[in-house]
Image (cartoon, grey):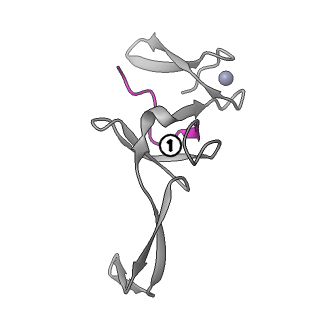
Amino acid sequence: MKVKIRKGDTVEVISGSNRLKRGEVIKVLPNERRVVVQGVNLHKKHVSQIQAQGRNLSPGIIEFELPFDISNVMLVCPKCDNPVRVSIRRDGEKIVRVCKNCSADVD
Ligand SMILES: [Zn+2]
């Protein structure tokens, strides 16, 4: 089965403790069938010092998103603003995702 969720999509979590949360997909792990969604499934980590791009950031607690199963999210249609199933339409070389709710092209 093809993964219909892509990086940059807005998705809604449909099950688990993060249910009804929405966020942007920041990473898709197609082989593991997992996604990382901004602001969802946050975990806290205590750090003494962070080095990021050569800068030292102050110690403290950082929050980061953990990947979770792709079947727990649904794509939010930009047209009808609902979590929807999509079908696939071929437009020449391009694969276009179509909202099954309002028939709008998602891509
Ligand atoms: Zn729609």
Name of the residue lying farthest toward the left: 31
Q: In the rendered structure, which amino acid carries the disc numbered 1?
A: Gly
Look at the numbered disc 1 and give the secondary structure of its residue: loop
Q: Specify whether 16 is left or right of 64.
A: right
Q: Quadrant of ligand 1?
A: top right
Which of 30 and 106 lies nearest the eye of the viewer?
30
Q: Specify whether 81 is left or right of 63.
A: right
Magenta span main SS:
loop
What is the span of residues highlighted in magenta in the rendered image? Answer: 1-13
The quadrant where residue 79 appears:
top right
Say which residue appears at 32% left-offset and 81% top-offset.
54
Name of the residue lying farthest toward the front: 17
Q: Position of residue 55 (x, y in %)?
A: 37, 83
Q: Which residue is mark 1?
A: 8
Which of 18 and 48 lies nearest the eye of the viewer?
18
Up the image or down, 66 lies above or below 27; here it is: below
